[in-house]
Image (tube, rainbow, N blue to C red):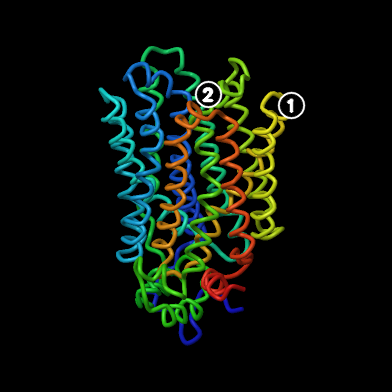
Amino acid sequence: MATTPVTEHNEPSTPPGAHATERERKRLHTKLKLATQIGQGIDGYIIGGIGLAMSDITDDLHLSSVAQGLVGAAPLIGIFLGGPLFGRLADRFGRRPVFLIDMMIFLVGSVLQFFVADGTQLVIIRLVMGVAIGGEYAIGAPLLSEYAGRRGRGRLLASLEISWYLGYALATVVGAMFTSVDGGWRWSLASSAVIALVCVALRGGIPESARWLLSRGRRDEAEALIAKYGIEVDVTAELDDRDEVRQDGFRALFSKQHLRSTVFASVFWAALVLPYFAIGTFWTEVFEALNMGDNAVAALLVYSFTAVAGVTAGCLVVDRIGRRKLLIPPFWITAVCLALVAVWPSSTPVIVIGFLFFIFLNAASSALTSVYPLEVFPTSLRTTGVGFATAMSRVGAAIGTFLLPMGLDHYGAEFVLLIGAGVLVVGGVVSQFLAPETTDLDLARAARTAREGA
């Protein structure tokens, strides 16, 4: 398989002295990796931060159960809007500008959270922040994947999910620090501005994606970047893909050529995150509904760091055991875990063991949410496809987060957990039939494998 950093016909037209030194190449790759990892971690941070703050926010802003659900679901709804929007913009106008703009929007929203006077303002601000995060999903990981080599790409991209869970866990720690402070929830929520500011600073000077340039017919510019930074790109496969994939935009996602990839990426992602987001956001309420006492804060810390361990394990094995083995068996096992907790809610050992297995394995498979969607779409549709899959994943998560407090009030924790188990079963069935094996394939060839159902 040809994966050389030059074309088959001639040397790229790179001006003399334009080749970067090895130090400059490493610096660019490090900046890009950190800028993407921090951006991914920010999503986990604002989801994790709301969990411990929700009770105080409810008291201070006098939120109803419906308003609580909207505050929790607002970022997820925003991601639903921002993923497709920014994804389409990044496929049309380039990765680089979107990569910076979305984080600047998030930075402003982070600061504004501190000054909210009522629940409506908080919902609107977190909705806008969610739009920015949707852009982050649509552009961050795809840009990183387009600079990555085929070997070790899975581990590199999966490390973004470690960042998500670390962000979630860090927000839990920060939230715990402010629980005894009057108005501490304001400081807790606004603290994401510090992280966003660092992220904006890192993104300056990062160049455009060579693969995107190839997909737009700008071959000379692409080859100059490939030569300068030693990027591993199968130029022939990318150009062949450009000739083969003539449609772009949202309509192309539902064409016969790409429908399989669209359905798979959307459903597996939604099925993984719906139970986790819903239970994590209202963990205190779930914990109390299961009559587990007053240790919800300590349990949430265990919940968060078990997830970090799980996604780290997934990151370490994703290139060794392959994508399908990391995705499909955990779907079935975690469904059984939630079902067992629902059936035996009076057994503390069942609750503890069931939740620990669910958290660990769900997080391990979630490493693939930063891998699979980027590999099943061609370059010309990559950010559009990832943006749409992100949106669909957050539709499920937003619905679950919005309905969970009402489900607890009317039907109890057992019913809620059985619904979560059912969602995981759906994810397992769809993945069994549609998930391709893309380990160690060049991005262009991985997308072709997904289209052909190999």
Residue 336 visible, this orientation: yes
Which structural element holds mark 2?
A: helix
Residue behind mark 1: 349
Residue at image x 43%, y 64%?
382
**How packed is label 1: few (under 14 Cα within 10 Å), some, or many (20 or more)?**
few
Image quadrant where one finds the N terminus: bottom right
Residue 11 locus on image (x, y percent): 46, 81
Between 326 and 15, the one nearer to me in the picture: 326
Q: Horizontally, is 186 left or right of 417 in the view?
A: left
Corner quadrant of residue 188: top left
Residue at image x 58%, y 53%?
426
Residue 313 locus on image (x, y percent): 67, 45
Residue at image x 48%, y 38%?
44
Which structural element holds mark 1?
A: helix
**Residue farthest to the front?**
410
Label disc, if present, on residue 27 of the rendered structure = none
The relative height of residue 102 versus residue 259 in the rendered view (above or below) is above
Q: CA distance from mark 2 to mark 1?
A: 19 Å
**Residue farthest to the bottom?**
9
Residue at image x 43%, y 20%?
55
Between 54 and 185, the one nearer to me in the picture: 54
Residue 60 locus on image (x, y percent): 34, 16
Point out the tag, 2 or 1, that comes first from the N-terminus: 2
The relative height of residue 2 versus residue 174 in the rendered view (above or below) is below
Residue behind mark 2: 284
Residue 230 visible, this orientation: no
Residue 137 locus on image (x, y percent): 43, 51
**How packed is label 2: few (under 14 Cα within 10 Å), some, or many (20 or more)?**
many
Between 14 and 129, the one nearer to me in the picture: 129
Amino acid type assigned to the residue bearing label 2 in the image: Thr
Amino acid type assigned to the residue bearing label 1 in the image: Pro
